[in-house]
Amino acid sequence: MKLNLALAQIATKLGDVDANLEKHLNYIKQAKDQKADLLVFPELSLTGYVLQDLVASVAHKPTEADPVFKHLLKASQDLDLVVGFVDEDSRHRFYIASAYLSGGKVLHVHHKVYLPTYGLFDEGRFFAWGDSIRSFDTRFGRVGMLICEDFWHASPPYLLWLDGADIMLFSSASPGRGLNDREKLESARWVERVSKAYASMFTSFVAHCNRVGFEDGLLFWGGATVNDPNGELLVQAPYFEEAIISTQLDLNQLRRTRARLPLLRDERTALVQKELNRILSRD
Amino acid sequence: MIDLTINTDVAHQILTGFIKSEVTRVGYSRAVINLSGGLDSAISCVLAVDALGAENVLALRLPYRTSSPDSLEHAQIMIDEFKIPSETIDITGMVDPLIKHDANISNMRKGNIMARVRMIVLYDQTEVFKGLPIGTSNKTEILLGYSTMWGDMASAINPIGDLYKTQARQLARAINVPAPIIDKPPSADLWEGQTDEGELGFTYEEVDKLLYLLVDQRYSPQECIEEGFDAGFVNSVIARIRRNQFKRMMPPIAKLSNRTVGYDFLYLRDWGT
């Protein structure tokens, strides 16, 4: 089975959801013309990243009735979509969220679990923490979604893997930082390294879509990647520039890789559970 | 080993992208720069030219009667080499009446007046040229507070404020800032014979390495001393950074209401763009 995967690393207008929706619909049309089956947008792609006091005013609910999502749900009749947005629950808690839309329906919403609140980041001040990490079924098999800091921790991709995800879709709004004498910024090197590592260790497809553009002095570096279950890079988008990239995932590669390298088969989950129980029950 | 080497291609790409994005997203297409003849303004100027096109950058030469002739000349080399529209406005007639009010005025006060008059001219010319004023302060001087508040620090955006002076020199070479500008001793040229390093009492080479450890690498003062820096030097630099924090901030507003600018009214400058 083949999956034509496209990643749109876009720049967004800060707090202007209508303008960002229009950009989404343009890229969706491009991806459709390129015969993409699934198009992934970056973290907070509908709103911009450093929202601060804009959070409440840009929140949307991923439902038919929502004036933004009704367009995206309609577009998802043609191809599956992952979009980034601010989700508001019924008790008015706001989450950094990714929604997977397919066939006019919302298949899954992931709320960002790890909110970086240190250094240049201040997410915990403005957002509620997500409290679940779940894989879900799509027409291409089982998929898992994580948002930026989620995959700076090893446990969320691991949980998705155990929960059946063979395709991991990571989205980010990662500000470029760490300029030294190398050709790549430190932030880019780190994310590329872990994306490749997760693909290799979990013998899974790992796609990462980071945004581009400036917000004040922060430059989001782009450089979207797709790695295959052997940890080989299939495609990479340019740094710093808006782009849509695509690649065909040969899902049979999962079988070939895992026949050679049965890491999933040999994973000792009961041992993990036993040791976690012991570690977590320590006084 | 403390290595401040930067990849100048990446720096150039990011900083020209920054200027282009931050100028155009607020509805402008042009920039204005006070071209002092020194290194920092030359770098900001080339970056602006590369980002917006030479025809969209206005270079201002704003000499005072005691300014070094080299400063004017070096600014002119930039203007000629990069074919930048320019204006030369002598600020002597604006500065001297104020200076004459006080026979005992210090060099520092005179220098601050010149820097602030240059700011007034810069902002006035932004209206004429319909451009945003581009900053020229580097990370070293921002951290040390070696600058005039509301003077040379004033700008709409600052492309070079996260580059130490020694890194700015690397970038200058890579983007073809003319050699005489790179090679001469850094000077604010506010009075005759003034040099940055003479006034500061240490070289940029030395202080940049220390600042890199203290600020970028989060070394404690003691760890810097263990790395071989003189204790007196370390402590004086730390004191200087702390003493000048006020220059790096907007004036604090006394809180009265439930929502106050600066504390809990939080939006980026790029809000809505």
Image (tube, helix red, strand yellow):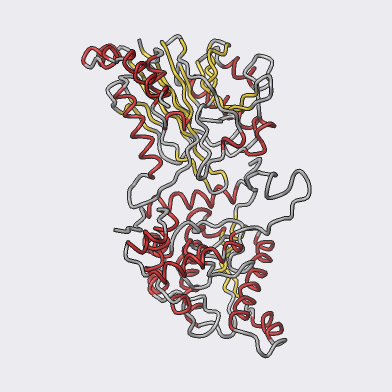
Is A243 placed above or below B107 here? above
**Which residue is at the front of the view, B8 or B256?**
B256
Instruction: Using residue B81 as the reference point, say whether residue B254 is left or right of it.
Output: right
Q: Residue furthest front?
A: A283
Left or right of B146 in this view: A268: left
Identify the residue at horizontal 31%, vertical 16% (top origin): A271
B38 shown above or below A149:
below
Question: Between A109 and B252, which is closer to the camera in this rendering?
Answer: B252
In which quarter of the view is residue B112 placed? bottom right
Task: Give residue A9's position: percent from left, percent from top.
Answer: 48, 32
The residue drawn where x is 48% and y is 58% is: B47
Residue A180 point in image, percent of width and height:
36, 52
Q: Residue at x 54, y 83 (%)?
A: B191
Q: Is residue A117 left or right of residue B224?
A: right
| Quarter that holds the C terminus of chain B | top right
Q: How many marks?
A: 0
Q: Position of residue A39 (x, y in %)?
A: 48, 22
Using the image, determine if residue B249 lies above or below residue A143: below
State the quadrant of the N terminus of chain B. Answer: bottom left
